Image (cartoon, grey):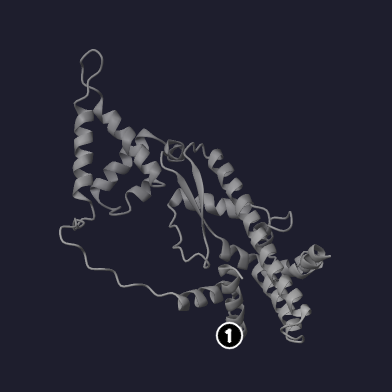
Amino acid sequence: MTKNSARKKAARAYQAAHPGTTFPDALRAVTDSATSTPTAPPARAGKRQPSTTGIDPQTEAAAIEALTALARSTRSDGSQVDFADTLADILVVVAANMGSVEGLLRGRPTSWEADLIHRLITGAAAEEDLPARRTEPVRVPLDIDEEWDRFGLADLAQEAFDEINGRMLEVDDESPESGALADEQLAVDELEASDRAAYISAFTATARQIAQEHGITAPTEVITSSYLDNQPAHEPDELEERIRYAAVVRTPHPITDSNATELMEQGVRRTELAAALRAAGHDYRARVARVSS
């Protein structure tokens, strides 16, 4: 049994002991109980500490040095460059990398300095043109467990697993029937993993298409998080969040060709969507049976 399969089995057992718990919450519970956060080691002597402003002094010094070099630059005829235009263009790109002008100025948005910087940037470039000026990769987050639970697919896989588990209780553990049923449970896990991978692939393609529609030429990456991975979720900036939401809305359902998000926004509940999948013969038990036959 793989590490992920073992965690899923533990999560399903946790759900059985805690009725009403969603599958992602059960995964989180068994993951949290199996891990602990180590105490951070003491800082080593001589290690550079951040300033009280949050600005790294060396980074600030490097920025001053670079801007000073730009200000001293000259054209081919020896005349001084237009530093104001260059600085405005730099701030436009920085704002684009932060996701928006507001994202750039979030540290103190109501200051008079922020007001002047806001006017400078928006005077140099329209807000809708910022995505095309981005130079850093766009990192779009995808919480695959949240989407799976929202689609009702976690419940479908669990129902299939539990149905097989019920049959296992009726046979001897050492019998060939028990081994065959264990293979069916593994097939359920493999089918679910395949569906999740297919959805991630479709979501990634959709997110990249949306990024292109925004005029973004910087690379677009999808950062997938799962309770099974024990990885912190990526916190998106404003642009990344807009792309994430649009991709969730536009990505087709991982099993059917329909757009599940659009159906739910029209009032179709998760339980109704799951029922529709069962009626269409897409539940995991039926699919395992087809694969096994």
- Label tally: 1
Residue 157 horizontal/vertical position (percent): 68, 70
Residue 145 horizontal/vertical position (percent): 57, 65
State the quadrant of the C terminus. Answer: bottom right
Residue 290 horizontal/vertical position (percent): 82, 64
| Res 258 quadrant in image | bottom right
* 192 or 254: nearer the viewer: 192
Q: Kindly identify which residue carries mark 1.
A: 18
* Label 1 environment density (alpha carbons within 10 Å; few <14, some 14–19, many ≥20): few
Q: Locate residue 10 relative to residue 183 in the image: left or right.
A: left
Q: Locate residue 127 relative to residue 11 in the image: left or right.
A: left
State the quadrant of the N terminus. Answer: bottom right
* 223 or 43: nearer the viewer: 43
Q: Looking at the image, is 82 positioned above or below residue 49?
A: above
Tell me which amino acid carries mark 1. His
Q: Locate residue 238 relative to residue 207 in the image: left or right.
A: left
Residue at the (31%, 37%) spot, across then down? 120
Q: Looking at the image, is 68 positioned above or below residue 144?
A: above
* 141 or 176: nearer the viewer: 176
Q: Looking at the image, is 89 positioned above or below residue 45?
A: above
* 101 or 27: nearer the viewer: 27
| Res 253 quadrant in image | bottom right
User: Does residue 269 appear in this view?
Assistant: no
Which secondary structure, mark 1? loop
| Res 143 quadrant in image | bottom right
Residue at the (42%, 52%) spot, across then down? 237
Q: Looking at the image, is 93 positioned above or below residue 80?
A: below
User: Does residue 144 appear in this view?
Assistant: yes
Residue at the (70%, 75%) spot, across then down? 161
Q: Residue furthest left?
A: 46
Residue 72 horizontal/vertical position (percent): 19, 26
